[in-house]
């Protein structure tokens, strides 16, 4: 006899085995208890045969894969573009999320008397999205701009990539870096006469390292039959890229990923731009990293801080939401298409991000000069 719960029961009788499905992108957790004896099903529980249960699980797994693939399609810009209702809403979206460049003066007014702190996502924000994740280089002009920005305001890079990799792209030692979706935070390099040193500030998912390595190897092996699939090890999390996978093969890839993940209920799956992101189920994300960094910078309970977070991806929404909830600063979404977002403003692409950052630098330099003349 088998009891089939929608949710994990609060208590479990001795002698029962528990099979827990990994929480998916759609948050459909299924827990099944299998008991040794065959007592009648308690009131409120559905009693079904083991065969029926396995069939149900297969149907659920199938439904879940379909849901993953629908979500993979929905997150692809070409599909967003061709959604008529979203096209119709472009104008109202622009009204609700105006261009940060057009609203520059208003933004500066709002920040008056407050310390601006800058948080920048990397891929799609500082560098254009390209097919090969290893070639997502940042332009020299952008690097120069970010270097100047960091001289004016405390600046952090918050990325889904592992910290070392994003540092290799950005190459600026004076910044804070939060890699692996904020699970690996390090401060700027301090230069002494004899050496360069910087402190790792926080790594909340260290215990997951062996598991992540194990899953990385399994994913590489399992997905190698899908042309174009690429698994990236981001130290505390993993990315399975499907940008170069034929859309007809997305379902196959989703099944391969699921077949690995179902053995690891402590890992969860989220989605980015043509990428499935696998990370620990700990309550830590880019939003928490932003709060941690503000605290480390001494702005824990300050009302005179003005954090600005610029990002293009779903994972940046956690940071946008924190800023909205705190009622401090704001988020800027980098997107050409209307998207549901907690950001207040928008910019269309990395070039516009660079223009916005340059204007911030110019404004700061002018105000410093003006103050020194007083
Ligand atoms: O938080 P981010 O800095 O935006 O990192 C998120 C993921 O970005 C990278 O993937 C994305 O950019 C690639 C290069 O342009 C592109 O090929 C891919 O389709 C995008 O999803 C990075 O490779 C991932 O590891 C990050 O998690």
Image (spheres, grey):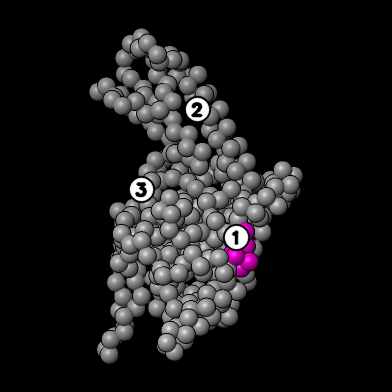
Tag 3 residue: 282
Answer above or below: position of 90 versus 140. above
Q: Nearer the viewer, mark 2 or mark 3?
A: 3
Chain-order first, disc 2 or disc 1 = 2
Quadrant of image for the N terminus:
top left
Q: Residues within 10 Å of mark 3 (few under 14, many from 20)?
A: few
Q: Is residue 141 magenta?
A: no
Specify start and end residues of the magenta stretch as a single range: 98-103
Tell me, for residue 346, which label it has, or none: 1
As helix, strand or loop, the secondary structure at mark 3 comes to: loop
| Residue 288 located left or right of residue 146 | left
Q: CA distance from mark 1 to mark 3?
A: 30 Å
Q: Nearer the viewer, mark 2 or mark 1?
A: 1
| Residue 161 located left or right of residue 186 | right
Residue 127, image x and y in percent? Answer: 57, 69
Answer above or below: position of 149 versus 53. below
Chain-order first, disc 2 or disc 3 = 2
| Residue 156 located left or right of residue 256 | left
Q: Is mark 3 within 8 Å of ligand 1?
A: no
Residue 130, image x and y in percent? Answer: 62, 65
In depth, the one of 139 and 266 nearer the eye is 139
Task: Spot the residue most to the left.
Answer: 14
- State the residue at coordinates (52%, 75%): 360
One can see residue 129 in this view: no
State whether the magenta stretch is mostly helix, strand or loop: loop
């Amino acid at each position: 006899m088998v009891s089939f719960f929608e949710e994990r029961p609060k208590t479990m009788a001795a002698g029962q085995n528990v099979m827990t499905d990994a929480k998916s992108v759609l948050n459909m957790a299924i827990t099944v208890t299998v008991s040794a004896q065959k007592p009648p099903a308690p009131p409120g529980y559905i009693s079904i045969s083991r065969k029926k249960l396995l069939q149900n699980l297969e149907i659920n797994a199938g439904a879940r894969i379909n849901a993953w693939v629908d979500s993979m399609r929905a997150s692809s810009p070409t599909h967003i573009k061709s959604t008529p209702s979203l096209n119709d809403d472009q104008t109202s979206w622009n009204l609700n999320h105006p261009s940060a460049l057009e609203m520059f003066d208003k933004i500066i007014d709002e920040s008056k008397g407050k310390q601006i702190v800058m948080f920048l996502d990397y891929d799609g924000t500082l560098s254009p999205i390209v097919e090969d994740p290893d070639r997502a280089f940042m332009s020299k002009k952008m690097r120069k701009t970010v270097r100047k920005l960091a001289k004016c305001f405390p600046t952090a890079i918050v990325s889904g990539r592992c910290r070392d990799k994003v540092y290799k792209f950005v190459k600026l030692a004076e910044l804070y870096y939060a890699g692996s979706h904020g699970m690996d935070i390090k401060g700027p390099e301090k230069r002494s006469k004899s050496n360069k040193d910087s402190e790792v500030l926080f790594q909340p998912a260290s215990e997951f390292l062996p598991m992540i390595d194990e899953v990385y190897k399994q994913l590489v092996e399992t997905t190698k039959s899908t042309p174009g699939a690429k698994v990236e090890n981001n130290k505390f999390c993993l990315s399975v890229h499907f940008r170069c996978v034929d859309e007809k093969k997305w379902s196959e890839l989703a099944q391969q990923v699921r077949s690995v993940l179902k053995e690891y209920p402590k890992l969860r799956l989220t989605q980015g731009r043509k990428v499935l992101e696998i990370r620990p189920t700990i309550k830590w994300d880019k939003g928490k990293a932003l709060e941690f960094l503000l605290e480390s910078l001494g702005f824990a309970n300050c009302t005179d801080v003005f954090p600005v977070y610029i990002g293009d991806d779903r994972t940046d929404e956690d940071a946008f939401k924190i800023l909205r909830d705190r009622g401090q600063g704001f988020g800027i979404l980098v997107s050409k298409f209307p998207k549901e977002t907690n950001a207040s403003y928008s910019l269309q692409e990395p070039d516009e991000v660079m223009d916005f950052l340059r204007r911030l630098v110019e404004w700061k330099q002018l105000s410093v000069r003006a103050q020194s003349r007083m």
